[in-house]
Image (cartoon, rainbow, N blue to C red):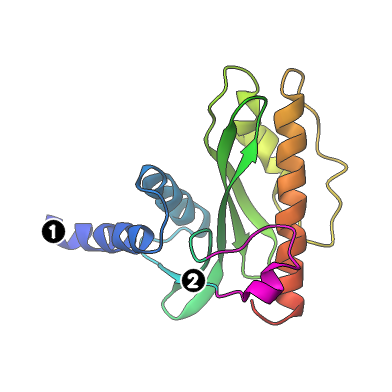
């Protein structure tokens, strides 16, 4: 009986690892996807983007950082993983889009600085929820002591929103 409950977890982890998500992040990504869509199992599918179209995107889309999420044959949304600059290092972040290409969730997965880690708070990140490529990010609040990280995250989010809009207009997603 316990083995049956582990099967979806094992398959989810195997899917994450087989598509290039770093092992150090796969459990965090898996948990967030399951929480956002309230599911126990799902599949990732690579989104193939030609180099010609990729050159037109503000964010680089690869088969290691952008995936379609499906469950029971239905598209639930998309996952995007990337890094953004902080003062002296980079932080890893995750963006989950719903099937309508609106942000369902954002999460800072790994923050490597002593200061500015406040951008990882759910409260601050929730400002991005519901945003699409048609929305401005001018209303995203600043955080004292995290100016560089906030600007970097806002810029990164603006770039992926624009990229997702372009991919949608070109009927890739």
> Could you say which quadrant of the image residue 173 lies in?
bottom right
Is 49 a magenta residue? yes
Where disc 2 sits, the SS reads strand
Say if residue 121 shows up in the picture.
Answer: no
Identify the residue under disc 1: 3
Residue 115: x %, y % from top left: 63, 18
Which residues are drawn in magenta? Answer: 48-62
Residue at screen point 61% across, 74% down? 49
Q: Give the CA separation, mark 1 to mark 2.
A: 28 Å
Where disc 1 sits, the SS reads helix
Is residue 56 shown left or right of residue 111? right
Looking at the rendered image, the quarter that the N terminus falls into is: bottom left
Residue at screen point 53% across, 27% down? 112
Is 20 a magenta residue? no
For the residue carrying disc 1, how many other residues have a C-alpha within 10 Å: few (<14), some (14-19), or many (20+)?
few
Is residue 59 shown left or right of residue 91? right
Identify the residue under disc 2: 46
Residue 53: x %, y % from top left: 70, 74
Residue at screen point 61% across, 50% down? 105
Q: Residue 79: which disc?
A: none
Magenta segment main secondary structure: loop
Relative to the observer, which residue lies in front, 51 or 152? 51
> Could you say which quadrant of the image residue 78 lies in?
bottom right
Examine the rendered structure and indicate whether residue 72 appears above or below residue 163. below
Examine the rendered structure and indicate whether residue 153 appears above or below residue 88. below
Q: Which circle's residue, 1 or 2, is located before the other in the chain?
A: 1
Say if residue 41 shows up in the picture.
Answer: yes
Is residue 41 shown left or right of residue 113? left
Residue 145: x %, y % from top left: 73, 18
């Amino acid at each position: 009986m316990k083995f049956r409950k582990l099967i979806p977890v094992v398959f989810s982890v195997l899917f994450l690892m087989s598509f290039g998500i770093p092992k150090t992040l796969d459990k965090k990504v898996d948990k967030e996807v399951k929480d956002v869509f309230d599911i126990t199992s799902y599949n990732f599918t690579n989104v193939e983007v030609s180099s010609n179209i990729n050159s037109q995107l503000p964010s680089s889309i690869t088969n290691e950082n952008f995936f379609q999420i499906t469950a029971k044959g239905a598209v639930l949304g998309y996952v995007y993983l990337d890094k953004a600059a902080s003062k002296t290092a980079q932080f890893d972040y995750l963006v989950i889009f719903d099937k309508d290409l609106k942000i369902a969730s954002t999460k800072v997965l790994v923050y490597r600085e002593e200061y500015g880690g406040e951008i990882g708070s759910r409260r601050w990140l929730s400002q991005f929820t519901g945003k699409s490529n048609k929305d401005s990010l001018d209303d995203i609040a600043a955080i004292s002591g995290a100016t560089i990280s906030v600007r970097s995250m806002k810029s990164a989010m603006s770039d992926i929103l624009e990229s997702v809009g372009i991919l949608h207009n070109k009927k890739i997603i």
